[in-house]
Image (cartoon, rainbow, N blue to C red):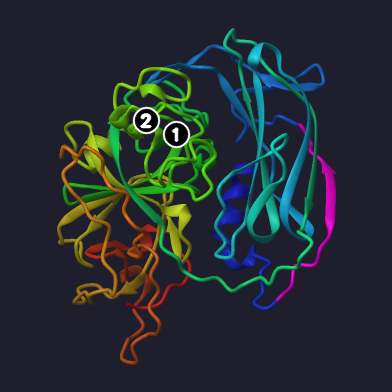
Amino acid sequence: MRRFATVLAGMCLLLAVPTVPGALAVPSAETWGAELAVDGGDDVDVVADDGAVRLRDTAPRSTTTGPAPAEGTLLLAPRRLGAVADRVSAAPTTDTPGGSQVLVAVRSIRDDGSWSEWIPTGAQGPAQLPVPTLQVQIRVTLIAGPDGASPALRRLWLTADSTLAPRRMSAPVATPPFTARVFATRIGLVGNTTANGHRIVDDDRFVALPSRRGLAPDGTGDYTVRICAGGRCAWAPVWDVGPWNVRDDYWGTDRESFGDLPRGVPQAQAAHDDGYDGGRDGFGRRVANPAGIDLADGTFRRDLRLTDNGYVDVAYLWTGTGPAGTAPGGDPVTVRSAPSPDAADVGVVAARSRVPVECTVAPGAVPTTPTTTPAPSAPATQAVARPATTTPTTTSTSRPTSTPPSASVVPVASRWLRLGTDQYVPAAALEVPDVPAC
């Protein structure tokens, strides 16, 4: 399945990464025609019909801010390129009746083995990748028009090349994720389908963000957030788009829309609090709350133990780099305040989440104080007129510079992983590569 290929590419780390310190990216170009085959798996609400890919169901879907046009996704298999590239362009042949849309985006394997964010390409020009790479993946999103008309994708040609000036490919370096304080609302909508095709169940664990740039395929944690409130934290994958907007990647440095707003301030928050855009969202609707993130019921009520909508601290983990582990499918993982099963419960890692890991520690060891501090946490109901954007923290990805000489080897089954200050999970709970001792 293409999903398996995607997860494997994200987990194999340096085995999947072509970067070598000191290597040069030689200018080259490679063009190919995409195989527009719909075979289930990662494809969402699309069919191959009459020589084109179309939406299978054009009925509007429910969201926390009202009905939204139907959309579907064609996720192509990851492609290993013949030469290093740092740019991808797309030339689709489409039919877009009644205001329907066909959106093409690309992502690439980064130096630490994780996927970059999805970057739009097509009529707006080539997608400039964050680092030179040998592996890319293409996603095509089909969106119905206001009257339910489905677009059609008939052909798709893609070209990967490198910029004229050769780039020196660097060794992986751990960097902290961007963190912001935003207003969170509860999703609910049990039984409905998210933008990535996930069917919402009782006490589900995932989040929605108002941009497709950070939307993970169903069942993966390629894009995971850490939400903290009231002394607890939850790690959950991004499986839906919303609230309010769909092109508001407010956590990014190169914002797709609303570029005049500060980084970390959602457009809905600016509209609600300051009358930005006349108090309306990107669709012209009156903004009723300043939400910048939606939380599924399990994340909201069980993991964070929230009782009402309010402000939370969110780390957009894919904006950082460094060692990370993935929670397998099944039960969520309880986060402890110390490396012991008897320590206090301080949070939850949802299944499939991709979690930055600082280091390993033996059970019962006295935790050492890291050189960095965690993102601040405050009760979700705290009233804030305009929360200030926080600066990135290094809690989740800081890497010790050396291993203490006295450190002893501890069996994997009994080791613990430190995720941040006073945050530990059993090493066996995550699929994780080797990380240094604390």
- Magenta stretch: helix, strand or loop mostly: loop
From which residue to which does the magenta span run? 23-36
- Name the residue nearer the viewer: 265 or 81: 265
Which residue does the image show at 49% across and 30% down from the upper left?
246
Q: Secondary structure at mark 1?
A: loop
Which picture quadrant has residue 93? top right
Please state the horizontal and vertical placement of residue 126, each as a whole percent of the image: 72, 45
Q: Secondary structure at mark 2?
A: helix
> Mark on residue 268?
2
Q: Which residue is located at x 33 percent, y 86 percent?
A: 408
Callout 1: few (<14), some (14-19), or many (20+) C-alpha neighbours within 10 Å?
many
Tell me whether the residue at label 2 lies in contact with that at label 1, contact meaning CB atoms closer than 8 angstroms: yes
Sequence-wise first label, 2 or 1 = 1
- The residue lying furthest to the top in this view is 147
- Rendered image: mark on residue 343: none
Q: Nearer the viewer, residue 335 or 182?
A: 182
**Measured from the top left, where is residue 38 in percent x and y?**
71, 29
